[in-house]
Structure formats: C-alpha cells, structure tokens
Image (cartoon, rainbow, N blue to C red):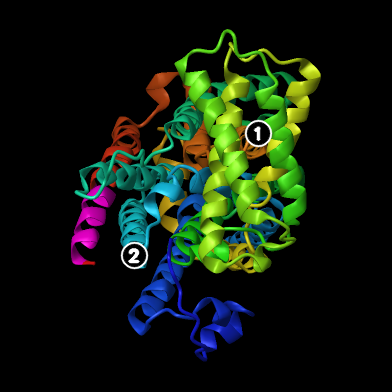
Amino acid sequence: MLNIKLTPQKSNWGYICGNLNEFMFGLDTGLAILLVVCLLLACFFEFINGFHDTANAVATVIYTNSMKPTVAVVYSGALNFIGVITGGIAVAMGIVNLLPMEVLVDSNPYHGIAMILALLLSAIIWNFGTWYFGIPSSSSHTLIGSILGIGLAFYFLPDNVGGSAVNWDKAKDTGWALLLSPVAGFSLAIIVMFIFKRLIKNETVYKEPVPGNKPPIWIRMMLGLTCGMVSFFHGQNDGQKGVGIIMMILIAILPGYFSLDERVNMQSIAANVAKIEYIVTHSDTTKFGADEFKHSTIVRENAVAYKQVTGKKFNSTDIAITDRFGIRRDVVKLTKSAEKLIRSPNFAISKNNKKELEAEIKSAKKLVEYAPSWVIVVISMCLGLGTMIGWKRVVKTIGEKIGKQHMSYAQGASAEIVASIGIGMATWKGLPVSTTHMLSSGIMGTMVAKKGLKNLQKKTIINILLAWVLTLPVTIVLSGGLFLFFRWVF
C-alpha cells in the first residue's frame, strides 16, 4: 500500500480539477509531473480514438455528400460527447478489471507509472501509425493488447511471487466480444442489405454517390440518423475505455484517494458483505470440488476481514488513507469469488437466493466500481474534439478502397445500422467492442451482398486484415517490453 505523507502543496492543476490539489499531497515533484504526463497521455489516446475510430461513423455521410465534412464531424463529435456522459461505467470497469490492481499496486508508486506509461505509449504508437496509413484499425484491440502485454510481462519480474497479473476470465469475455464483432458485422450487413432490397424499391438508394451532388432528402435523413447512432454508441462504448484508463492511473498512483467511492455509505456495503457471506456459507457444499471450496473460504475470510477494517465507519473518508486500498482489495476478491460460485454447476442455490446474491454483489461493487464526474467530462471532451480532426484518411479507405465499386447509400446505411446495434448491445453487456471492426466488416458485407467476394479490393482487405491480426501481438510485445524497461528505469 502506498503510504502518503500529508504535506500541503499549492497546485494550479488542483484548482482546475476542483479538489485534485488534495490528491497531490505527499507526491514529490517528479512523481507529480509523471502523474500529470500520464493523465495527458490518456487524454491524447482518447483524442486519437476520436479521429481514428469515429472517422468510420462520419465516412458514410461525408462520402455520400449527405453532410458537409465540418457539419458531420461536429455532429458526430457532439453525439460522442453525449454518449460518454450517458454511457455509465460498465465498460470502463471491464478495462480496469483486466489487470488485477490488487496485484500490480505496491508500495512503490513508480511501478504504477511504469505500467501506465507502457500501456499508453504502445496504444498511441499503434493507433497513430495505422491512422497515418489510412488503415481502419481497432482502438479496442490496441488497448486490450497493451493491457495483456503488461500482465504477461509481470510474470518476468524478479519480485513476482506468483500472483496472477491478468484477469483471464474477463480477458476471455473481452476476447470473444472483439473476435465476434467483425464476423457479426459482416454477416448482419449482408442480411440488412437483402432486407433493404425487399423493402425499398427506389433504385437511387443503391447507386454510387455523384461527386458534388446531394442525395434526396430522405436518404440524407436516413444516413444522418445512422451516423448519429454509431457516434452515440461509440461514445458510450469507446469513451468508457478512456474513463477506465484514467481510473487505472489514479488507482495505481494514488490508491489511497481513488480506491473507494466516497459517496457510498460504508454501512450499506457492510450489510451487503454480511448478506453475501450468509448466503454462501449456508449453501450446500457437499458437491463442492477443490475450486469451489477455495472460493467459499476466500468469501468467508474476506467478509470477516472487511468488517474488521470498516467497523463503524460511514464513508470512505472516515477510513485511514493507508487502509482504503486494502478494503478495495477485499471487496474485489469477495465479489469475484461470489460470482465464480454462482457460475459453478456444483453451487446448490435456489432461484430466489441466487437473485438476491446477484443483487448484493452488484450493490457491493458500487464501492469500487465508479468514476468521478470530472473524469467522464474530460474524456467526453477529448473524444468529441478528436472526432473533429483527422477524419479524411480513414474516410477515403471506407468509401472507395474496400469495394471495387464505391459505397452506395444503402451500403453505408446498412453498415451503420449493424454497427450501432452491435455496439449498443456490447455496451449494455459491459463489454468493449470494436467500432472499426463492426463498421469496416459491415461495409465488406454490403459489397459481398451486391456482387459477391469478387467485389472486394484484395489489396485493401489484406492490409485491413493484417492490421487486425497484428494489433494484438504487436501491442502485447510492445507494451510488455516497455513495461519491463520502465520498471528497470524506475
């Protein structure tokens, strides 16, 4: 646990961010500078995410002359902003939970700096490189690869005593979501194109845009709606990834201040913990194997430890700074263990008790799964501003280079309908998904629906697929190498 000596210091940064000056207490000048650098890099990542990923959303309306570029990017940027503000934090916590903070956070705050710098620099390098060459590449895959690289590199540290540095259960869920998104985008776009053919007989919608000519108003409205949907859901999903990154930074470097949500009543959490312990310990354990027994033991131990630490405290601010991360660790282990028990086929529990247990787990998580309002607003602004810059390279690839024929109005609408539905469902489930993969594969699907596989431009498709395939291994190696290097430096 990071022991922080409280020494008041004045800070313009703290004035800008409300009470952030309080969180700078005890940080030496070098560490405070590195903290600010990490926060700025996180904002820059989300800024790049804006003009990298959201170019997919505005590609259809710009390429089909449905909106002027300036109007389209401002429109998309505004909806991205709204999407982040209204999207909750389920996806953000999915990002945070990929790396067990209770394993990676230790008494040396520079170790947290090493982790964050490696993650952000590797993600930014790959994202910027693929954007420069106009290749639609997934910021989600980039970020996940960077996180996994750090987790895997953690095993090579001499001071690692065997702790797992990757939440493989969460990584598996995330991996499936990212893997299935392009397959779903490709397949569903073909189906939507066939539905369009059945319902809309006006041939204008299936023709290529004429440079300089605006399409009929109803087509412009349709494409404007689908562009808005993709932008909004992109903000809800991808914007949360930036929120998750900043929370990783704050927890890793200032665990005493950001481990717990100070708005949550500690007594209600203690009641949740007691109820979880009661339900688990009163379940039938006769069919439990070694794994289930281990989980139930952890649940009981964590529950006892947690109640001993909290006592009669009502808010996290009543708890000593040095104890807060320990409480976070106990709650995280408790809820994870209970969730594993629920999924176990050997866990004999009634439907009512299962429903009650799930509700108690969800309530207990509120203490550790949160993000301050200022974090959400900052990420919203970065994503919105990024959307308004740098869109041209990817727009040209989406509109002209995927298919041998230029994208028609119906193709653009079909791909965006599929992408918005897919991203929306992933956000609802709290899973990160690739906007780029959903939309780009959707465009491929519409091209195939029109004239078969021969309608795809082989060179472009190979470049896109190579970028998709290489993103994870390249970012894993890059972030892992940078992490080990920074740990050696610090």
Residue appearing at x 52%, y 54% in the figure: 326
Q: Which residue is mark 2?
A: 108
Contact between labelled residues 1 and 2, with CB atoms less than 8 Å apart: no
* Label 2, label 1: how far apart the Cα atoms are: 39 Å
Residue 91: name its quadrant: top right
Residue 75: name its quadrant: bottom right
Q: Is residue 305 above or below residue 381?
A: above
What span is in magenta? Answer: 478-489
Is residue 4 found left or right of 114 in the rendered image?
Answer: right
Mark 2, other Cα within 10 Å: few <14 / some 14–19 / many ≥20: some
Q: Is residue 215 above or below residue 254?
A: above
Is residue 236 among the parts visible in the rendering? Answer: no
Q: Nearer the viewer, residue 185 or 87?
A: 87
> Magenta segment: does it hold 485?
yes
Residue appearing at x 47%, y 32% in the figure: 441
Q: Nearer the viewer, residue 202 or 15?
A: 15
Query: Looking at the picture, which amino acid does disc 2 mark?
Result: Asn
Residue 195 coordinates in the image, percent (x, y):
68, 21
Q: Which residue is mark 1?
A: 425
Residue 23 coordinates in the image, percent (x, y):
54, 76
Q: Disc 1 on helix, strand or loop?
A: helix
Residue 98 coordinates in the image, percent (x, y):
45, 42
Query: Looking at the picture, which amino acid does disc 1 mark?
Result: Met
